[in-house]
Image (cartoon, grey):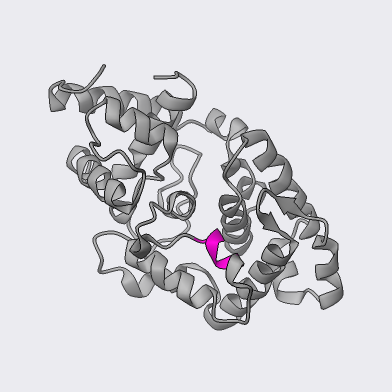
Amino acid sequence: MTKNVPITELKSFLDEKAAYYEQPKFIETDPIQIPHLYTAKEDIEIAGFLTATISWGNRKSILTNANKLMALLENSPHDFVMNHTQKDLEHFDSFVHRTFNSKDVTYFIKALHNIYTKYNDLESLYTPFNKENNLQAAIHHFKKEFFTLPHLVRTEKHISDPLKNSAAKRINMFLRWMIRDANAGVDFGIWTTLSPSQLSCPLDVHSGNVARKLGLLQRKQNDAKALSELDQQLRDLDPIDPVKYDYALFGLGVFEKF
């Protein structure tokens, strides 16, 4: 299956692949397994957000370090965020995942405390932008709110900004986890004020390369412009749930070496 195939044939192919990969067994090798450790909305949000934040590089390393983070949060992410002391934050002094270090993670904990104090959950930061046909502007405003406390400028790079031409792969992945329904046993569907139709594909080297081979994406860079192009193509295939195709594109690239 390559580019220039009829759209009906392409849709059938991708629908089949999406259904094949969106199964509970997908969790076994994916960072989404970390928020699946929890049942409370706030714990799932925080575990998911922090895990998505460090989801770049070697998958084994991502899982190892995400589990370390949860242990440092005493396996009660929301309780730790809301009730930690300065002394508790010293336990993170040795934490590092690539360029995400102890100073970054301790700021993230403080910022999350600030957000949960003001809004009660992360979903509420996105809800005011529910009128958008996508959530890229909402991500920009979430980042602005997240960094209202004093912080190191370097920490800002760990949340991408689509309005600065980033594809924002990790935050779009987090939003997929929170918003798509849980019927298949993979995503959570715990954010009900936002619609799966607004989601954007977590565009990375794997999904981007497969999308180009299938003729869904022409732009060579994996940036916000490429994401907008891919978004439109996926919405044409399924306007209600376009990001189900993330499973197809990712699975084809990572597991099938398409």
Which quadrant of the figure has residue 139? bottom left
69 left or right, relative to 216: right
Q: Residue at x 57, y 54 (%)?
A: 53
Q: Residue at x 65, y 42 (%)?
A: 62
Would you say residue 183 is visible in this rendering?
Answer: yes
Q: Quadrant of the N terminus?
A: top left
The x and y percentages for residue 227 are: 31, 48
251 left or right, relative to 165: right
* Above or below 210: residue 153: below
227 left or right, relative to 67: left
Is residue 158 within the magenta segment?
A: yes
The x and y percentages for residue 228 are: 26, 50
Secondary structure character of the magenta stretch overall: helix
244 left or right, relative to 96: left
Is residue 255 within the magenta segment?
A: no
The x and y percentages for residue 196 are: 33, 52
Which quadrant of the figure has residue 129? bottom left
Q: Nearer the viewer, residue 163 or 24?
A: 163
* Above or below 200: residue 7: above
Q: Residue at x 60, y 66 (%)?
A: 154
Q: Quadrant of the C terminus?
A: top left
Which range is magenta? 155-159
Would you say residue 124 is visible in this rendering?
Answer: no
Which quadrant of the figure has residue 164? bottom left
The x and y percentages for residue 192 are: 40, 61
Query: How many marks overall?
Result: 0
Q: Residue at x 38, y 51 (%)?
A: 167
